[in-house]
Image (cartoon, grey):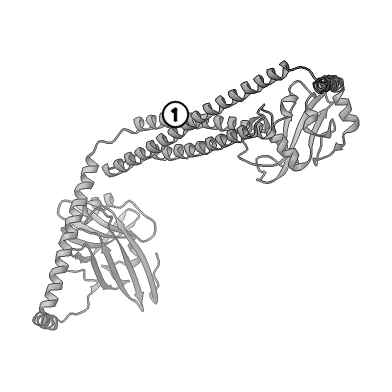
Amino acid sequence: MIYSRRYSRNFIPLKQDSTKHNLDFRPSLGRCVIEIKDGKGKINIYAQGISPKEEYNLELIGFEKGNIKNISLGKFNVDTYGKGEFSVLFDPDNMNSNKIEDFNVISVMVKDNNNISSALVGYIGNEIDWQDSYKANAIINIPKDDCSCIEKPEEDDTNDNEENNNQNNNTSDFEQGLIDKEQGLIDREQGLIDREKGITEREENNIKVPLDEFENSLKERLDGLAEKEKGLAEKEKGLLEKERALKEGFLPTDDKELREKEMELIKRELELIKIEQELINREKELIRKNPTSDREKGLIEKEKGILEREQGLIDREKGLIEKEKGLLEKEKGIREKNKYTKKEVNNSEANTNHQHFKDMLDNLKKNMMNIQNMDNKNNNINNIDYIKCKNITMSPFVNNQENITWYRISPYDLINISANSWKYSNNPFIFTSYKKYKHLMLGINNSDDKETYILAIPCRYEKDFNLKDFKEFLPIDNNISTQSIENGEYGYRILDL
């Protein structure tokens, strides 16, 4: 780093280099400010979270082409709170025949005749691995006086002593009480710190589960939850189909009251499924946690107990729903029995002119239905030809294949197009799209000897679309790749019939 001799000011963060010099469980930290003005330099250092039990020295260290330079700035004093401040003047062009630019590491270190350890370190530029080289090449000594390049401001000891004496003489009982109270708070805080240290050490000594065993157990439990989630999804799909059938009148439930009761039970079951899915997500988060302390383990076990309790309430609600379903089926059976009993009584009554007329109408209705079914069978034979003649042709895509002709159709036209087309005539997704966009499209491909048929359902693109039969999507601008298409793009879900 290049420093301007006219004026420069650089901030260097100091971070923890060794945990053994920490005051407590929290990491130590600090900052260094190197300021140069009119050719004179000043270094200010502030640090906190350092244990006061050691004697620390400040060092500037430089590494260049394998050469190591180090200079001691002086002792760094730390109070009982783990805080320390340091300020010193220096000549940026004469630091033991070196310049300030020659140094790229600043360290708050403990030095003795046998070893060197660093409490805080800051890097002027990029971080480097410096300790091994420093220990191998640097001279280990504890400076008795500050370096000759350091200019310390003069201090008047006489005035300081007089001021201290005056302050001691003028200290009132009230101030002394405040001092004692503050000392008590310091002792209390130190006790809490020692307690936290003991807890931390005990947690570190606990035997942790090996990583392989933890990952295998995690995988098994997550796979079990995935299977449970899949079962809930299948159940939800079945309930939605049943609800749709009830709404559209496909199920033979003539009584409006019974139909409403069934709808209410389905609604309650769907709500329970959503709650169960939420519980599964919460359980997944708990499973992924690897507790590192007794406290974390206790919190996780407590949350697991809450989840089990909620699951028990859900199971209880399920039992009530099943009981209501049984009562509903019983009521259906009673009503059906009453209906047939009433019918038998009516049949046993003497025939009247009114009854003869009613029977005649019923027979006529049955005959008309048979005739209509025969017409439908005949029409279905030529259903494709009918679509080609009567339905409107469409050109929805930018680049349409010449061998495919698109016709506008309705869901009713799907009954007899191919062997499997009938099962899509009542599909909820197809009905919803037809209702929203007022059309479906049938593509007839004449490229082979035999015609093949393609169904196109209008919709907007969704990346998370999950209906397996309708996975393939073709945008209106069919030059767009499905990998780059965005949500909301108009197009068609394509299905081979």
The residue positioned 32% from the left and 41% from the top of the image is 302
The percent position of residue 55, horizontal first and vertical second, equals 16, 60
Amino acid at dot 1: Gly
Quadrant of res 260: top right
Compare residues 6 and 339 and report the one nearer the observer: 339
The percent position of residue 40, horizontal first and vertical second, equals 32, 76
The percent position of residue 359, horizontal first and vertical second, equals 81, 20
Compare residues 99 and 311 and report the one nearer the observer: 311
The reply, left or right, for residue 115 in relation to residue 402 is left
The reply, left or right, for residue 494 in relation to residue 23 is right
Residue 252 in sight here: yes
- Name above or below for residue 169 compared with residue 136: below
Q: Secondary structure at mark 1?
A: helix
Total marks shown come to 1
Compare residues 442 and 131 and report the one nearer the observer: 442
Residue 479 in sight here: no
Figure quadrant of the N terminus: bottom left
Figure quadrant of the C terminus: top right
- Name above or below for residue 138 compared with residue 234: below
- Is disc 1 surrounded by few (<14), some (14 to 19) or many (20+) residues within 10 Å? few
Quadrant of res 459: top right
The residue positioned 36% from the left and 77% from the top of the image is 37
Quadrant of res 31: bottom left
- Name above or below for residue 359 compared with residue 243: above
The reply, left or right, for residue 332 in relation to residue 400 is left
The percent position of residue 130, horizontal first and vertical second, equals 30, 52
Q: Which residue is mark 1?
A: 224
- Residue closest to the far right: 389
The residue positioned 32% from the left and 71% from the top of the image is 92
